[in-house]
Amino acid sequence: MKHYLIVGGTRGIGAALATQLIGEGHSVTIWARNAVDVDGAHFFINNPAERAPDLTGLPDVLDGLVYCPGSINLKPFARLSVDDFLQDFQINVLGAVRTLQSVAPLLKKSNHASVVLFSSVAATLGMPFHASVASSKAAIEGLVKSLAAEWAPAIRVNGIAPSLTNTSLAEKLLNSADKMDVAAKRHPLQKVGDPKEVAAMAAFLLSPQAGWISGQILHVDGGMSTLKN
């Protein structure tokens, strides 16, 4: 049994990952802003996007950390304020930084620690109206590579860059059959992402099977970032 921390694990990809890891017999602690029950997980209210997290309830050793919070703030560049950029940076980057700095001593006690952060296909593929979120997710990719180098060989650090995934975060973009169909057709694999598919990649990166993988950004995006549709 390994001990994992999932930040933002009460819905979408985070909840799917927690369910998978618990089903495999691991211990999972979830941090989130609001109390939501995930069967079998240890839950604590923490919002590292706003303040340094409280480490109460964490085990002495952490084998893995997954930081799931994200944002979809789509606006024309002319309508984006500096506050929009700051908010996306707070959620996507500074929340991850506060979490990583807080739990690094616990990760370093493990013999096989792994960190997974989330980028976006928009950090690689230029997409209109994505300037603020793409900027913050590109920063996450830089953080992944820098920390992977700094923390090697003790801690592996990787990122996942999904395309549009059917979660509550993307609800406004997928809340009708027509929207779902249009979104699916934008991808070479003709579907939007399923949270369980993205969670499965995160679980793999946490596992010993990924023991020779670090500093990578894995694109789980229906082929969008590399294939012409």
Image (cartoon, rainbow, N blue to C red):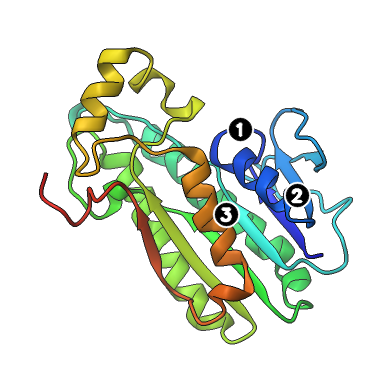
Q: Which residue is mark 1?
A: 11
- Identify the mark nearer the N-term, 2 or 3: 2
Instruction: Report helix, strand or loop for mark 3.
Output: helix
Q: Which residue is mark 3?
A: 96
Inspect the image, locate mark 3, and give the three-letter code of the amino acid beneath it: Ala
Q: Which residue is mark 2?
A: 22
Left or right of 111, for residue 223: left
Quote the CA–CA distance across marks 3 and 1: 18 Å
Q: Tell me, yes or no, whether the two marked residues, 2 and 3, touch with CB atoms within 8 Å.
A: no
Left or right of 196, for residue 79: left
* Quadrant showing the C terminus: top left
Quote the CA–CA distance across marks 2 and 1: 15 Å
- Foreground: disc 2 or disc 1: 2
10 Å crowding of disc 2: few (<14), some (14-19), many (20+): some
- Where is residue 129 drawn, in percent x and y? 22, 33
Placement of 97 over or under 129, stated as above or below: below
10 Å crowding of disc 3: few (<14), some (14-19), many (20+): many
Instruction: Report helix, strand or loop for mark 2.
Output: helix
* Quadrant showing the N terminus: bottom right
